[in-house]
Amino acid sequence: MPINYYIFLSIALFCIGIAGVLTRRNAIIIFMCVELMLNAVNLLLVAFSKMHHLNAAAAGNSTAGTDGQLFVFFIMVVAAAEVSVGLAIIVMMYRNIHSVDVNFLNRLKH
Amino acid sequence: MNITQILFWLLSVMALFGALMVVVSKNPVYSVLWLIMTFFAISGHYILLNAQFLAIVNIIVYAGAIMVLFLFVIMLMNLNKETEPQRNRWLKVAGALAGGCLLLVLVAALYKSEMQGQSAEVNTGSIGLIKNLGKELFSTYVVPFEISSILFISAMVGAVMIGKKE
């Protein structure tokens, strides 16, 4: 499969995530769109690792490309930790202002 | 058009449609369900690329653990279509336009890149199998692996500390 297809698919997913972050006001949905962007990057990393593997296998290196897939694994690990802390913060925010609307989070302005 | 290509396009359409529905759904619970569908489509892409370990981890960690956490929080707060805050129309248009502009710029920049002739290996190749990844993970990357466990325990402690009632 040409690598271009994967690049454009990942770009499209990433841009949908960005549009979601910019257009929604619900903090949880914004957080989900950030997850979507992370996943777009993961997909591209895996595709590039397979591309690198294909090129390096011709030169005799049969384990080239494992690094990229392990990076994806570590990204997933960090994302899981990030989600637990982020959702705890959102729950605390809901407890304080009884809403998940990010427009209420402008206390620094006043 | 062989079976691999058909599966690629099917999974791509599934992923993009799911992602769009995440953004446009009014009800947050539906957004979570569409996001789960997107994650399954991405896992399908991983299987197509023969990255089986990552496909399973993606399903277990993302579609399983993380999305259940999201769903749980949404149901705990009793969010639904009526309580959903809405931006005004012009801000929505501006946001969609900004995302579209980024898409346009990136596609235009990468349309004639040097990557054109390259291709990703599908169906074959053994680097995505758990045997090779495990060998690499527990030899070269063993220190980051152990550090990530410290990260997890600190995230757990942090989540409990933040979520605790004073």
Image (cartoon, rainbow, N blue to C red):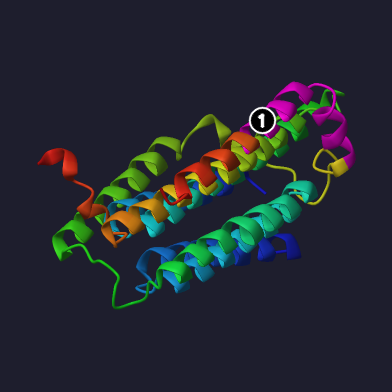
Mark 1: amino acid: Ile
Q: Position of residue B151 (x, y in %)?
A: 62, 32
Left or right of residue B65, residue A12 in this image: left
Quick one: which residue is furthest to the bottom in this view? Answer: B82
Q: Position of residue B1 (x, y in %)?
A: 69, 64
Instruction: Find disc 1 in the rendering and name its residue.
Output: B150
Q: Is residue B144 magenta?
A: yes
Count of numbered badges drawn on the protein? 1
Residue at image point 46% right, 68% down: B76
Residue at image point 38% right, 71% down: B79
Q: Position of residue B81 (x, y in %)?
A: 33, 77
- The image quarter in which residue A76 lies: top right
Label 1 SS: helix
> What is the crowding at mark 1: few (fewer than 14 residues within 10 Å), some, or many (at least 20)?
few
Chain of the residue under label 1: B
Left or right of residue B22, residue B160 in this image: right
As displayed, is residue A50 above or below residue A29? above
As displayed, is residue B30 above or below residue A54? below
- The image quarter in which residue B47 lies: bottom right
Quick one: which residue is furthest to the front in this view? Answer: B166
Residue stretch rendered in magenta on the structure = B131-152
Left or right of residue B165, residue B49 in this image: right
Classify the position of the C terminus of chain A by image quarter: top left
Evaluate whether residue B7 shows in this view: yes
Residue at image point 79% right, 25% down: B142
Q: Position of residue B100 (x, y in %)?
A: 31, 51
As displayed, is residue B2 above or below residue B106? below
Residue at image point 78% right, 47% down: B53
Q: Is residue B11 magenta?
A: no
Evaluate whether residue A16 shows in this view: no
